[in-house]
Image (spheres, grey):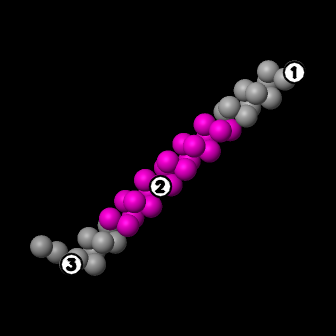
Amino acid sequence: MGNPGTFKRGLLLSALSYLGFETYQVISQAAVVHATAKVRQY
């Protein structure tokens, strides 16, 4: 097998990019809901 440190780094990068993607989805969803609520007010 390869270097365990490289494997850990890859795992960490995968986890971070997944978390970043999830955060992005939540934020964009919240922005859409907020914009829709704003449009309905007027």
Earlier residue among tags 1 and 3: 3
Q: Residues within 10 Å of mark 1 (few under 14, many from 20)?
A: few
Q: Assign a secondary structure to mark 1.
A: loop
User: Percent from the top left, x then y, of residue 12?
Assistant: 38, 67
Structural distance between the alpha carbons of marks 1 and 3: 60 Å
User: Percent from the top left, x then y, of residue 23?
Assistant: 55, 50
The amino acid at mark 1 is: Tyr
14 vs 22, left or right, is: left
Structural distance between the alpha carbons of marks 2 and 3: 25 Å
Are the residues at dot 1 and dot 2 in contact (C-beta closer than 8 Å)? no
Q: Which residue is mark 2?
A: 19
Above or below, 30 against 36 in this view is: below
The amino acid at mark 3 is: Asn
29 vs 34, left or right, is: left
User: Residue drawn 47% across and 55% down?
Assistant: 19
Which of the labelled discs sits on residue 42, or is there none?
Answer: 1
Q: Assign a secondary structure to mark 2.
A: helix
Q: Residues within 10 Å of mark 3 (few under 14, many from 20)?
A: few
User: Percent from the top left, x then y, of residue 22?
Assistant: 50, 48
Q: Which residue is mark 3?
A: 3
Q: Quadrant of residue 42?
A: top right
Looking at the rendered image, the disc whose residue lies closer to the viewer, 2 or 3, is 2
Is 28 within the magenta?
yes
Q: Quadrant of residue 39?
A: top right
